[in-house]
Image (spheres, grey):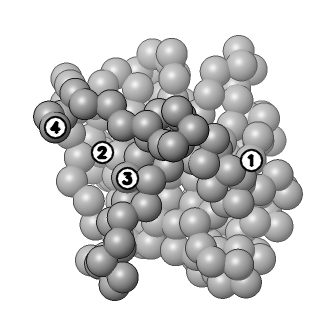
Amino acid sequence: MNQNTRLYDKDGNEIKSIAYDEGSKKYSFYTEKDLEEEEKKYTFYDDQEKIADEKLNFKPLLLPEKYNYQNARVYSEAGEKSDYAHFTYKDSKNREIILFESVSSKEAAYETGGSDVKEINIDGVDIIFHDGDTFEFERDGLLITLLCRNMTYEEIKEVYKDIYLYK
């Protein structure tokens, strides 16, 4: 097999993702439907403040009411609070904005990259701007990716300036 080989399950559904569990030494195979079902378990439509209070181990960065909050994805086992969350919004032009957040730690550290990568600084915060739509930065003890689809740099900067730390 090479990287372009497609795999299918016994029912003819294409395998979209494969995961390996170090503990059990077993592979799991996921179709598109499996991935959608898995994602549903982690997507919540409660208001963002309730998500912050009940589901997170940290105080997240949020956007104010001028942005239309859609949902949050919280990655943890049932009944446990998480160190990771994604908050999805729409702006007044119905463009998607996603705040990917995690507690800044060695376990949550990651590398970034992309095209047209620039280092910028806004109000004393060092930011990596890449792909024409993404700011990545560390602030308030959190690692943040701000993804703003179909926006100009100035519009993304305005969204960034509207972010506030939930108390």
Label 2 residue SS: strand
Q: Are marks 4 and 2 in contact (CB under 8 Å)?
A: no
Circle on res. 127 = 2
CA neighbours of label 3 inside 10 A, class few (<14), some (14 to 19), many (20+): few
Seen in the picture, residue 116 relative to 18 is either above or below; the reply is above
Q: Nearer the viewer, mark 4 or mark 3?
A: 4
Q: Nearer the viewer, mark 2 or mark 3?
A: 3
Label 3 secondary element: strand
Number of on-image labels: 4
Q: Label 2 vs label 3: CA separation?
A: 33 Å
Q: Which residue is mark 4?
A: 1
> Of tags 4 and 1, which is closer to the observer?
4
- Alpha carbons under labels 4 and 1: distance apart: 39 Å
Give the vertical position of 96 relative to 164 (above or below): above
Label 1: how many Cα within 10 Å (few below 14, some 14–19, many 20+): some
**Which residue lies under the disc numbered 1?**
71
Q: Amino acid at mark 3?
A: Ile
**Kind of residue indicated by mark 1:** Asn
Q: CA distance from mark 4 to mark 3?
A: 15 Å
Q: Earlier in the sequence, mark 4 or mark 2?
A: 4
Task: Give the mark nearer the N terminus: 4 vs 3.
Answer: 4
Instruction: Give the Cα separation between the discs numbered 1 and 3.
Output: 26 Å
The quadrant holding residue 162 is top right
The reply to whether dot 2 and dot 3 touch (C-beta < 8 Å) is no
Circle 3 residue: 18
